[in-house]
Image: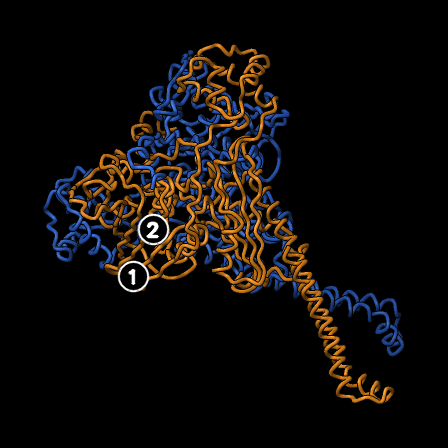
Chain colours: A orange, B blue
Amino acid sequence: MPDIKNADELFKDFKAQSVSEFFKKNAAMLGYTGKIRSLTTLVHEGVTNALDACEEAGILPEIFVRIDELGTEHYRVTIEDNASGIPLEYIPQVFGRMLAGSKAHRNIQSRGQQGIGVSGAVMFSQVTTGKPTIVHTSTGGKYIFTGKVQLDVKHNVGEIVEKEKIHNKWGWRGTIISLEAKDILYNKSRYSPYNYLRMTSIANPHAQITFIEPDGTRILFERSTHTMPKLPKPIKPHPYGITPDDLLTMSGNTNKKSLGQFLEKDFVRISASKVAEIGRQSGVSMKMRPDKLTWDEAERVVKAFKSMKFFAPPTEGLRPIGDEEIQKGLESTLSPEFSHTITRAPQTYRGGILFVVEVGIAYGGKSGKGGIEIIRYANRAPLIFDQGGCAITEAVKSIDWKRYNVRDVEKIPLTIFINLVSTHVPYTSAGKQAIADEEEIFAEIRNALMDGGRSLSRYLAGKRRLYEKRSKMNTLLRYVPETARALARLSNKEQDTIEERLATLITERYQIDQVEEDETDEQ
Amino acid sequence: MPDIKNADELFKDFKAQSVSEFFKKNAAMLGYTGKIRSLTTLVHEGVTNALDACEEAGILPEIFVRIDELGTEHYRVTIEDNASGIPLEYIPQVFGRMLAGSKAHRNIQSRGQQGIGVSGAVMFSQVTTGKPTIVHTSTGGKYIFTGKVQLDVKHNVGEIVEKEKIHNKWGWRGTIISLEAKDILYNKSRYSPYNYLRMTSIANPHAQITFIEPDGTRILFERSTHTMPKLPKPIKPHPYGITPDDLLTMSGNTNKKSLGQFLEKDFVRISASKVAEIGRQSGVSMKMRPDKLTWDEAERVVKAFKSMKFFAPPTEGLRPIGDEEIQKGLESTLSPEFSHTITRAPQTYRGGILFVVEVGIAYGGKSGKGGIEIIRYANRAPLIFDQGGCAITEAVKSIDWKRYNVRDVEKIPLTIFINLVSTHVPYTSAGKQAIADEEEIFAEIRNALMDGGRSLSRYLAGKRRLYEKRSKMNTLLRYVPETARALARLSNKEQDTIEERLATLITERYQIDQVEEDETDEQ
């Protein structure tokens, strides 16, 4: 076999690459595919970061987005927020290093969760223009810092190539990032930054977003509420959501002195008496040092968890948008004939990861566009790409809409708004545009949709009854002249008067019905 | 504003994580979502690695896959290949370190391209069972090495926790990996390891795969050809596919002394005279040291590339399956009434990344199952998940099948086989189950489908004509007795004889037509 290559020859090319090199080669995984999508992804990364930063700091967001056209398929994107600002020493890490961030290791609801997004934007800019990203930031102190940041792709570290500080005469606080990119294109399609910001505004009624398009048009997405949503809280893990591997990782890092103390303090819903029961059931000593736990013991502890009853995880950590705000959002953008919103009770997937599903259904007005339009969100961030590969889409498709009085699914003017809220959204890709098919999430979305479907069904049935009654009324009205003539002859009264009275009688009866209809429908 | 948190407080939690930590938290991105899919993903990673290893070494693959059920939702997966084996020192890197491999930085067609897959499998095993993966390997030398490998997730490095060597009395060469996992499930659905291997066998007719199911059933997917496909070759980059950033990365790493030499030797289709033209057009000295190239100069060189004519990239580097082998695969698995295959000429996307689209269309027999069934491949590896988010599916959906004589798209028994071959497949996610929407790839798939559609259309039209002729013949045959009676009376002959002759005449005429039909159809 002369052609066979041996192992040493084959392995001489073996090399490791950095995570930045990986995503540079596979930029499509971060959403950098196609000229329009790439530009929207840049805006998306900047805006989600800005909104998260404001929320973490407890500040009502004022976001400013500007896109300047610098040449053919060459733009500058500038995003400003009024959040807490970034301490100088963190700038290279925040903007220039992938998988670095403050969100990935906290069990808290936020738009970002990976520490990849904004570094990915800096990388895309650098790879297409060779230029660093300019960051201006101040924590509200004496200075405003300006740094030009770039990625050392090979080593996945950020570098400030130029920095400057000026006196903060204005007491300004916030962050501005400004980056250039080529091979991108601005338009106003469904996949554009414009629509992305519009959708962001619907799900974030507390945020004010100003957008300046390349042609200079200024668009203000005004906030419809001045109430700051309550801050999401970090949630300790629940015993049902823990694998032996998680338990070992946690027990290796805890500062608690005994296993029992560790279980009681580092988890929710584990009381001292539960600790004793875990000890009995697992046969593992609750007095042992947590860092001495073995895999086998961890498996026994987790088995004990599964066989015991615990209260459901506390839900105050999650912050859904809420029925009222969703309703406002749908009404202001779609002016529907009918709308209905559902915020379901929190559930868990994979045993213990908290999530909430919110659904809004809007019918008529500007809803739908030849069939069902789905608008998807995860933690209030719009998902506008990869619709086909998303569990939300699958759930909508799995509903038999005909059962809900929808006669022609292809044509019904229906918009379905869905927001998945979770401390950890199971995205299918680092580009964060589609949700993986987790059984419990799929089932919850279906439940919410069926709830919405029933309500829609009542409305449509009412509408149909109304239509039928109106036809009946029109038929009756058609006979009025003849009947009036006959009655006039029999009673020797004026035909005109009788005709008028008959018509009023029929119309009034119909109107009472209509009010009744409206009352039962809107519930 | 007493509730506002300041930056120092917010950033105290800022941390970096390793790529292994990232994928551990986001295992869905690697395909570990759902019990059935997780098991299939384990098999997929092992088998693609095995096939790649055989092909690289020029060895006809003999793959052995065994799944043992060890408890409830607890299995052992064992995969053996007869490839070149792995030198001992590379074991921790191959199996325990993400983003390490020999494929990512070579411009060559292979199933794996990331250096994530098999380390991801080792991680999933470790996270669900706490156990290392057992690797037996020999390069055919004196010893067989056995190593137990695990991942240090926090630092993304692999460790051998136990090793052993025995004398290789048998002269065995190859690799066996054996890993356990929990929370997974074996069944025989479309998404199962069984179907995965069946699909692998269709697209890899040179591979022999033996599969032992948990209940002991032994399934042999025999090779249908003993010809080893030609080895794919690494392809040097083509000037049209290069960005200024790529050029700078390459010029920083080359050992060539001048820019001109670098362009001529490290690219395809750049001759000495082209170098001179690049120099003239860009105004960049071709005598400069490559590592001194600036961004601005790189941009000018790339601009010169785009304005010049170069031969298309050489195509011998790509190895499509080929019409004949696809046909064999479809016939042996589907026994269709009609089939047609198309291997298109190589094209490039993003300027210069080579790809080829192959399509097979099978109608009737076991094809389709109530409508169009799509079977997708990338570099001969089956894509069985994320169908909805894949450019291949979008392309199939974008075809108006009614134009190709398909009357009922919902019911037609049609299977469409599509294989995308490329030196770099643009996957949407690290799980490698869907292809990103690159314009040129989408267009090529459509072209191939339209070609297949035309052929299908001719077949279906023939089938319809045949049906119409058969109806006409039956009508004629119905009149035979009456005509025969009339003729018998006129001619004074036996009615029976005339009847028989008439029937034969009509039937024969019809049969001649049928042969003609077959001949024109099958072209």
Q: Chain of mark 1?
A: A
Q: Please tell me in which quadrant of the rendered image residue A441 appears.
A: top right
Instruction: Residue at 34%, 39% (x, y): give it.
Output: B2
Tag 1's secondary structure? Answer: loop
Specify the amino acid type for callout 1: Pro
Determine whether, in the image, residue A459 is placed left or right of residue A28.
right
Local secondary structure at mark 2: strand
Residue B448 appears anywhere in the view: yes
Q: Dividing the image into 4 quarters, which one contains the N terminus of chain A? A: top left
Q: Residue at x 42, y 13 (%)?
A: A257
Q: Which residue is mark 1?
A: A214
Classify residue B65 as left or right of residue A148: right
Label 2 neighbourhood size at 10 Å, few (<14), some (14-19), many (20+)?
Answer: many
Q: Is residue B72 above or below residue A487?
A: above
Q: On what subunit does the disc labeled 2 rest?
A: A
Circles 1 and 2 on the same chain: yes
Residue topped by disc 2: A62
